[in-house]
Amino acid sequence: MAQLAVRDPGFEQRVRDSFSRQQFMATLGASLERVAPGEVLIALPFSAALTQQHGFLHAGAVAAVIDSACGYAALTLMDPGVGVMSVEFKVNLLEPAAGNRFVAVGRVVRSGRTITACQGELRAVQDTGEVVVALLQGTMMAVRDRAGVAD
């Protein structure tokens, strides 16, 4: 893996401030648990309000929380003052998302000036341990000079 270069010494506070403004993660009940260069962890408690018809975490919630973890992982390595947006992602749902809580980890694979490749996973925390229930491969973009898109 290539060396990950931090371009903004204030990246952690920047990510935390941005996450606190993201209303969808708040609606889901997600919390930002760890911010490190090129890696972000977001936790999501189980909520019946987020399940599909069989009682498992809905795929939409699964994708949203991993996408956010990857986007914020990408932001940790971006220049100060730029925003981050997803360009594309693919999610593999490996098994039904059943657990007491869920942990999404986003990691940067390669960070460029504009495009960042990321991988993410969602682990279900169960009484017997943790199980990886979904994987994400995604591309995030640094957004510059666009009104309303920064940090």
Image: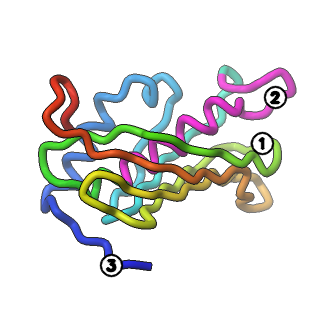
Q: Nearer the viewer, mark 2 or mark 3?
A: 3
Total number of numbered discs in the rendering: 3
- Which residue is denoted by mark 2 in the rendering? 55
Q: Is residue 90 left or right of residue 18?
A: right
**Could you tell which of marks 2 and 3 lies nearer the N-terminus?**
3
Q: Amino acid at mark 1?
A: Ala
Give the alpha-carbon distance from disc 2 to disc 3, as whole Å: 41 Å
Identify which residue is drawn at 75% across, 52% down: 126
Identify which residue is drawn at 30% across, 33% down: 20
Identify which residue is drawn at 21% across, 66% down: 6
Give the alpha-carbon distance from disc 1 to disc 2, as whole Å: 8 Å
Residue 108 point in image, percent of width and height? 42, 62
- Which residue is denoted by mark 3 in the rendering? 3
Query: Which span is picked out in magenta?
Result: 50-73
The secondary structure that dominates the magenta segment is: helix
Give the alpha-carbon distance from disc 3 to disc 1, as whole Å: 35 Å
Q: Secondary structure at mark 3?
A: loop
Q: Is disc 2 surrounded by few (<14), some (14 to 19) or many (20+) residues within 10 Å?
A: some
- Which residue is denoted by mark 1 in the rendering? 98
Closest to the observer: 106 or 17? 106
